[in-house]
């Protein structure tokens, strides 16, 4: 068994390219059997640069004449939960690292106090403490790999835990061999293909002791109950290789998850359009054609969009995907609340997802008057106005001898100033607003026009209009009124240009 374990762990490490020559690696060392085993194996697999420290305890000595293949550091986190036992574990780890000549960093956290302060469980607080310690240690030593000692039993237990609670393919993959950590670093797990029994048997044959955490026997913790009751039952009554088969299934699901993520990333560009809604404000439009993809790929693409907007994927899963898929089949204007302050709405040709916090901050500005030459601001919009005077002159299509060519730009318009009623202003839409759309004076309700132009309902109040009373002369970004157009009889032109200041 000893030789088999060493061979299997080495092959597993090489299969996933966990550690390369010259890497600087930090190993999480609790003192338990799994982390002690990992420490010994890494020293056996790679020549390490460390052989101790000098008399001052600061400088590390090197093996003379040997080219180092790996620089190895250990980090131990004392959660201060088990008092004397925790201190004994720390002392064991210190002695082991001194004997093995591995530099050690010890971090102490009052986890119980942290949990009470944050209103979370001690398990979650402990996890947060470890992540903080690991990140700090990696930065301190310039390391890019964090080696953790999760093994096959851990993966099988997590598989069952996630499956029963409800999860996705990624959750069923449970613990992965290689996982991104803080930017520029990865977690590697060389023991993930090795069982707890194999680890403990190897240590016994090597004559190496380890620490045992008494809380691991407390079945009030769900994972301990799975470990001590569910897994043994499966091994005894279903298949003695239950742990092996569960970890193989998790590995297969990990590969399937990776494949689907790649496929989703390659296809999403056909269905996703990111739209700027102002400074630091982004909304994402997802086209109806996404529904032509297999449902599983729809889910991956939708989850990617949610993660882009909220910056994380925790608590996002099947429920949110199904809600969004149902939203595609609802009538335009229907809305949906999502986690992390996200909102979604059925739009023309698809659905749109955005951050509601940004939406709530964007209040409808008060009307601002437009009186001849000058500049005015309405919310995020700035308008520059000029009055152009000229004598009578020939008018030929879109050109006048006096004024030149009429601008055809989306955000610069010419209007016949003498045809516009007084009290001109820039404002949001109002009930009863109308726009003349035909030369004979025929008009339409502004609401109907915006609907035909497929302006989403939640955005219509933020479309500025140039109006006087209920008469709309320009829907900014869209069209002007027919009864305000420049003609041969025009004597004064209102030139007005619009631009957003928050892009």
Image (cartoon, rainbow, N blue to C red):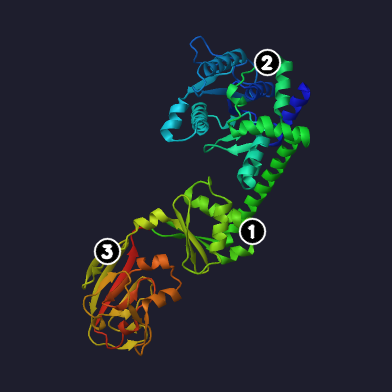
| Residue 268 x, y percent position in the rendering | 58, 58
Q: Looking at this rendering, what residue extends furthest in the top direction?
A: 55
123 and 55: which is toward the camera: 123
* Quarter of image, res 208: top right
- Is residue 341 depicted above or below 495 in this figure? above
Q: Please name the residue that numbered disc 3 is placed on.
A: 377
- Is residue 123 depicted above or below 450 in this figure? above
Is 281 displayed left or right of 20 in the figure? left
Q: Please name the residue that numbered disc 1 is placed on.
A: 295
- Quarter of the figure that contains the N terminus: top right
Callout 2: helix, strand or loop? loop
Q: Please name the residue that numbered disc 2 is placed on.
A: 208
- Residue 342 shows in the view: yes
38 and 299: which is toward the camera: 299
* Quarter of image, res 416: bottom left
For the residues labelled 1 and 2, the Cα–Cα distance comes to: 52 Å
Q: Which numbered circle lies on residue 315?
A: none
- Counting residues from the start of the chain, the first of labels 1 and 3 encountered is 1
- Is residue 36 depicted above or below 325 in this figure? above
- Quarter of the figure that contains the C terminus: bottom left
165 and 420: which is toward the camera: 165
282 and 317: which is toward the camera: 317
Is 325 displayed left or right of 406 in the figure? right
């Amino acid at each position: 068994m000893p030789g088999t374990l060493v061979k299997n762990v080495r092959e597993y490490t090489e299969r996933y390219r966990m550690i390369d020559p010259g890497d600087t690696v930090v190993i999480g060392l609790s003192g338990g059997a799994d982390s002690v085993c990992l420490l010994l194996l890494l020293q056996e697999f790679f020549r390490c640069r460390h052989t101790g420290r000098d008399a001052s305890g600061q400088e590390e000595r090197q093996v003379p004449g040997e080219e180092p293949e790996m620089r190895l550091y250990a980090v131990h986190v004392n959660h201060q939960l088990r008092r004397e036992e925790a201190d004994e574990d720390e002392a064991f780890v210190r002695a082991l690292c001194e004997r093995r000549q591995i530099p050690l960093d010890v971090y102490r956290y009052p986890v119980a106090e942290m949990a009470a302060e944050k209103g979370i469980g001690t398990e979650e607080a402990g996890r947060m403490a470890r992540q903080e310690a690991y990140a700090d240690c990696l930065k301190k030593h310039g390391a890019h790999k964090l080696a953790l000692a999760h093994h096959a039993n851990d993966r099988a237990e997590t598989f069952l835990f996630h499956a029963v609670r409800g999860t996705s393919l990624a959750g069923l993959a449970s613990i992965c061999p290689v996982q991104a950590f803080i930017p520029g670093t990865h977690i590697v797990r060389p023991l993930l293909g090795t069982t707890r029994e194999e680890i403990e048997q190897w240590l016994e044959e090597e004559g190496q002791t380890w620490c045992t955490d008494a809380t691991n026997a407390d079945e009030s913790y769900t994972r301990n109950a799975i470990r001590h009751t569910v897994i043994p039952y499966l091994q005894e009554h279903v298949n003695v290789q239950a742990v092996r088969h569960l970890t193989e299934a998790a590995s297969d699901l990990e590969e399937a998850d990776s494949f689907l993520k790649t496929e989703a990333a390659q296809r999403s560009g056909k269905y996703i359009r990111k739209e700027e809604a102002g400074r630091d404000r982004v909304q994402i439009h997802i086209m109806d054609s996404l529904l032509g993809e297999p449902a599983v790929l729809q889910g991956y693409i939708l989850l990617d969009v949610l993660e882009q907007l909220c910056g994380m994927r925790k608590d996002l899963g099947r429920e949110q995907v199904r809600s969004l898929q149902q939203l595609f089949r609802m009538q335009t204007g229907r809305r949906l609340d999502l986690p992390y302050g996200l909102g979604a709405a059925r739009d023309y040709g698809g659905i749109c997802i955005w951050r509601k916090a940004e939406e709530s901050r964007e209040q409808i500005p008060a009307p601002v008057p437009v009186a001849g030459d000058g500049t005015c601001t309405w919310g995020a919009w700035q308008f520059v106005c000029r009055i152009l005077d000229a004598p009578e002159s020939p008018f030929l299509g879109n050109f006048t001898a006096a004024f030149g060519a009429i601008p055809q730009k989306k955000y610069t318009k010419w209007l016949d100033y003498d045809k516009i009623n007084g009290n001109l202003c820039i404002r949001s839409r109002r009930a009863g607003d109308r726009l003349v759309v035909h030369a004979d004076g025929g008009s339409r309700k502004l609401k109907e026009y915006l609907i035909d132009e497929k302006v989403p309902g939640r955005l219509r109040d933020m479309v500025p209009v140039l109006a006087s009373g209920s008469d709309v002369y320009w829907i900014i970004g869209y069209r002007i009124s027919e009864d305000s157009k420049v003609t041969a009889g025009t004597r004064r032109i209102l030139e007005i240009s619009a631009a957003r200041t928050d892009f």
